[in-house]
Image: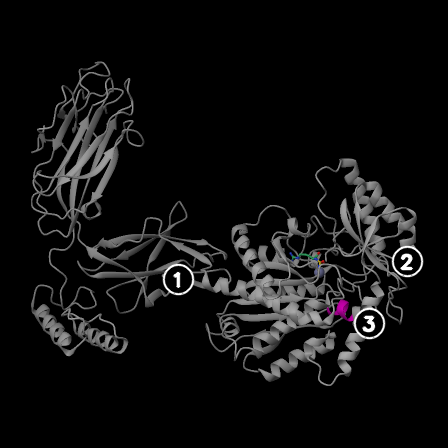
Amino acid sequence: MPCSPRPRPAATALAAAAALALLVTITGARAQQPPAHTANAPQPARFDGYQVVRVVNRSPDDLLRMMRAGAEVWDCHGVGIGPSRYLVSPDAQARLKAAGVQAQVLIRDVQALIDRERDQVAQARELRGPGYFSTYRTYAEISAFIDSLVATYPAMASRVSAGPSLQGRDIFGIRITGPGGPPAGAKPQVLLNSLQHAREWITGATSMWIANQLLASYATDSRVRRLADQYEWIIIPVVNPDGYVYTWSTNRLWRKNRRDNGNGTTGVDTNRNWGYQWGGEGASALGSDETYRGAGPFSEPETQAMRDFILANPRIVIAVDIHSYSQLILSPWSYTAAPCPDASIFDILNAGFEAAVESVHGMNYTAGPTYTTIYPASGAAGDWTYGAAGALGWGMELRDTGQNGFTLPADQIVPTSEETWAGLAWVADWLLDNPPLLITFPRGVPASVAAAAQNTIVFSVQRAFLRPAPGTAALFWRVGRSGPFQQAAVSSQADGSLAAAVTAGPCNSVLQFYVEAQSTTGQVVRFPSAGPAAPLEAVALQSPVVFADGFETAGAWTVGSPQDNATSGQWVRGTPIGTAAQPAAAHSGAACSFTGQGSPGGALGEADVDNGQTTLTSPLINLAGAPDAAFSYWRWYSNNAGAAPGADTFVVDVSADGGASWTRAETVGPAGPGTTGGWIQASWRLSALSPPVTPTSQMKVRFIASDLGAGSIIEAAVDDFEVRSFGCPLPPCPGDWNRDGAVVPADVAEFISAWVADLQNGTLVTDVNGDLAVTPADVALFVNAWNASLSGACGG
Ligand code: 0X9
Ligand code: ZN
C-alpha cells in the first residue's frame, strides 16, 4: 500500500522527529532509483533476489542503520518508528545481516512473484478463450473490453473519456445505467476509478469486473438491476495510463505518472496532486519521492482530466478511488486527523461497507478515516471528491495484506472483485434507502390550520449525507385533495428554518402540503417521500375567541371553594404593589388577579398565601357544539422566596360540568420552571388533556394556589385569560368528497373513481354506508348526499 511517513509516535522527541524527517527524505529518494538498471532500458527492470522485509525501528538510529544498509521503502506504509516494510537487494540483505538487524521476510523473492505473474499472463493467453478475468489485462486490452461491452449492451453502456494523459493516452471509461429508475439525466451517479497508481494491477481488473457485473447480471440479478436502474455508474479503470503501460513494459513496481520532473527525477504521485488541501501533510515536495505532489495543485493532465470530468458530472454522490494493497476502506479526511463534517454518516457507511466486503469471502478489511487508519495524505482523490465536489469520497485498498503485495495472483481477481462489489453495492443500496437531506418541521406537522386565513408552516432542510443546494427548499400546497399544487412563498428565519405562507380554505376543507429540496448533486428529496402522491394534510378550522378577560374590570370570577382554607393571601383583583415574590404590575393593562395585596413597603411575607389554599374560578363558559377548544392565560408563580422554597404548587383545572368534576391542565412546582416569578403564558387544548375534555355549555377553569409548607412565601397571579373554540360551525358537507370547501361535480367524479379503485383494490374508502362492502348502494347514498348539499348550507 501507501507511501508516506506514518504519523510520528507521541513519545518521539523533537530532535528525533527532525532527524526522522531528514531520513525519510533520503530514504524516499533512494526508493526512487530503479533497482537494477536505468528506467529506459530495453529489458524490464529485474528484482532478482530482492526481498520485502518487515523491520521494527525503535529509534532514529535504527532508521539511519536501515538507510545506510540501502534498504528501500517498499510500499509507502512508510518509514518511521515502528514496523516498516522495505525492499532489500541481495547486497543490502548482507549489510543488514552484518549490522545485526532483525528482519522478518515477507516476500522471499520479488522477481519470482513478477515472473510468476508474467508466466500466468502468457499462459492465460495461450488457453483457448480464457475467461477475461482469469488474468491481468494491458491498457489496450482494457480499452478493447470496454468497446466490446458497449457493443454487447448498447442500450445500457457507453464509452466516455476524461481526457488525455501526459503522453497523450486516452483516460477512457464506461458509463452504465439501466432503462428503469429516474429519467436519464436525473439519476445519482457513482464514480469508480482505479490505477492512479500504476503497479496496483488488481484495481483495474476489479473495476472492469464491476462494469461487467452491472451489465451481464442486469437481466438475472434483481439487486444489480435495482442499482443499475437507480444509479448511473461511471467507471474509469486506468487513471494513469502512462504509468500502467510502463509497469507492463519496463518496471512492474512503478507507481506514479511519467512526468519528467526536470531534475533527473520522474513521476508525480497523482494521488497527492488533487487540489483540496494540496501540499499539506503526507505529500512530498521532492520529485524523487513516491509521494511527490507535483509542481502545484492539479499540475498533471491526469488529475486535471479527472477534475473536469467530475465537475461535468455533478450528480456524483459516491466516488471511490480504488488502490491496493492492505484491505482498507478509507473515508475522509486524509489531510487531517480532524473528523470530517459527515463523520457520523461515514461511521455508519464504513461499518456496513466493511461488513459487506468481509461477508463474501471472510477476508478481513479495516475501515476508517484515512489519516488515522493509514497515514496522512494531502492532495488525495477522496478529499477532493468529498471536500470540493460534494460526493461521499472513499479510497479503497484491495487485497492482499502483503503476502503478494502488488503482484496479487490472478486467481484472486474474481474473489477480490466479488467482495469489493458487495461493499459498494451495500453503500449504494443504503443511500437509496436513506434520504440524503433531512426535512423536518421544527414546530411539528400542523394537524389543523386557521380556516380561510393565511397560515405559516415552519419547516427546515438540513444535510444528512448530501448538502442542500441553496434556494431549492420549497413547500407545495393545495386546498382539497385534487388539483394542482402551488409553491408557497418562503422566508428564512433567524434559526435557519423556513416559514412558508399558505392560505387555507373554508372551514372543514383540507389543506395538503409537502416539502421538496434538492442536494448540490441534484438529488430531489421530498417529505413525505411520495410528495404530491401522498402529501401531509391539515384540516381548516375556525378558532374564534369565545371568551376573554383581562381582569381590567370586575368580572364574574369567584374566589373561594369549599376546600379553601388559606388564612391570608386570598385572590383579589387589582394592581399589585409588588414584592420580591409578587409582580409589581399586571401582564397587560392596569389590573390582574393575584393572591393578596400587601401594604406599600410591607414585608415580603405580608399578605402572601398562608396555611392552606385559595381558589379563583371562572364564570360558566359556553362551548356547546365546538369540536375542540383551547384556553390560555398568563401566570405568575413564586414559591422560592421564603424559608421553605420549592415546597408548594400552583394548579390549573378545567371542568365541563359546571365545577362538579375537574380535569387537571397543569401543576406548576413544587420545583422547576415557572416557580420563581415572572409572567409566563400557558395554553391548553381540551382534546389534548388527559383525559381529553369534550366541550360543553358548562365549562369552567380554576386556579388554585396553596401554602402547605411552613414558612414558605407563595404568590400567584393570572392575567389575560382567553378561550378559543376550534372547529367549524357546521359538520363537513357530506357532498364535498374532496374537502375543498365546495360541492361541485368534481366531487362526484372523484367519488366514482375512488369507488372504482376500491372495487379493484379491495379497499373500503367509499364505503359510506359502513356495511364493510363497496356496492352501488354507496354510490347512491353519496349522490343523494351530494344533491342535498348542493341545495343546503354548504352548497357550491
Ligand atoms: O497513499 C496512497 O495514495 C493510497 N495508498 S497506496 O498504497 N495505494 O498508495 C492511500 C490514499 C487514500 N486515498 C484516498 N483517501 N482517496
Ligand atoms: Zn495506490
Residues at discs 1 and 3 in contact (Cβ within 8 Å): no
Residue 305 picture location, percent across and down: 66, 66
Task: Identify the element where label 2 is drawn.
Answer: helix
Going from N to C along the chain, the mark reached first, 2 or 1, is: 2
Amino acid at circle 2 = Pro
Earlier along the polypeptide chain: callout 1 or callout 3?
3
Tag 3 residue: 249
Q: Which residue is mark 2?
A: 90
Structural crowding at the residue carrying mark 1, measured as other residues with C-alpha within 10 Å and reported as few (<14), some (14–19) or many (≥20): many
Task: Name the N-terminal-most of marks 2 and 3.
Answer: 2
Q: Where residue 374 appears, x then y in whole percent?
A: 68, 52
Magenta portion: prevailing SS class: helix
- Name the residue tied to disc 1: 526
| Extent of the magenta region | 241-245
In the image, 631: left or right of 466?
left
Q: Ligand 1 is located in which of the four quadrants?
A: bottom right
